[in-house]
Amino acid sequence: QVQLVESGGGLVQAGGSLRLSCAASGRTFSSYVMGWFRQAPGKEREFVAAITWSGGITYSGDSAKGRFTISRDNAKNTVYLQMNSLEPEDTAVYYCASSPRLHQPIRTTSFGSWGQGTQVTVSS
């Protein structure tokens, strides 16, 4: 298991940008596929983006395509989510998660470790 801590959330105006970070504990960070998910009030948690162990392949959910970019720095045990052109509909708690394997389609049930989440609020 890996311990995950998200940061970087906050309040931003529509059209703005934020970069979320997720710091992982342990020395085996590169052994995990990392993902970002989000959950808005009253809605199910949804897939945002994922990245493979070395960062060579990324996957994006429909809400992220063309606007959000996932990346990772294995030397820093950190995964990032760069979010551009934010919209009020992007308001949610954003979670990072880890999985030793890549399961497709990518679902919340594929990931075993989760952070506590970071709130992103986009004002119109």
Image (cartoon, rainbow, N blue to C red):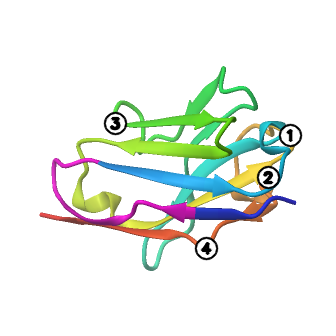
Callout 3 crowding tier (Cα within 10 Å): few <14, some 14–19, many ≥20:
few
Q: CA distance from mark 2 to mark 1?
A: 8 Å
Observer-side mark, 4 or 1, equals 4
> Are the two marked residues, 2 and 1, in contact with CB atoms closer than 8 angstroms?
yes
- Sequence order check, earlier mark of 2 and 4: 2
Q: CA distance from mark 2 to mark 4?
A: 17 Å
Quickly name the residue at label 3. Answer: 67
**Of the numbered discs in the image, which one, if any, rests on residue 116?**
4
Which residue is rendered at x = 59% and y = 32% of the image? Answer: 59
- Sequence order check, earlier mark of 4 and 3: 3
Amino acid bearing label 1: Arg
Amino acid bearing label 2: Ser
**Is label 3 in a helix, a strand or a loop?**
loop
**Is label 4 in a helix, a strand or a loop?**
loop
Q: Which residues are magenta?
A: 6-17
Residue 75 placement, left or right of 21: right
> Are the two marked residues, 4 and 3, in contact with CB atoms closer than 8 angstroms?
no
- Residue 9: percent from left, percent from top: 38, 64
- Residue 101: percent from left, percent from top: 86, 40
Which residue is rendered at x = 60% and y = 28% of the image? Answer: 58
- Residue 86: percent from left, percent from top: 25, 50
Is residue 8 rendered magenta in the image? yes
Quickly name the residue at label 1. Answer: 101
> Are the two marked residues, 1 and 3, in contact with CB atoms closer than 8 angstroms?
no
- Sequence order check, earlier mark of 1 and 3: 3
- Sequence order check, earlier mark of 4 and 1: 1
Q: Is residue 80 above or below residue 12?
A: above
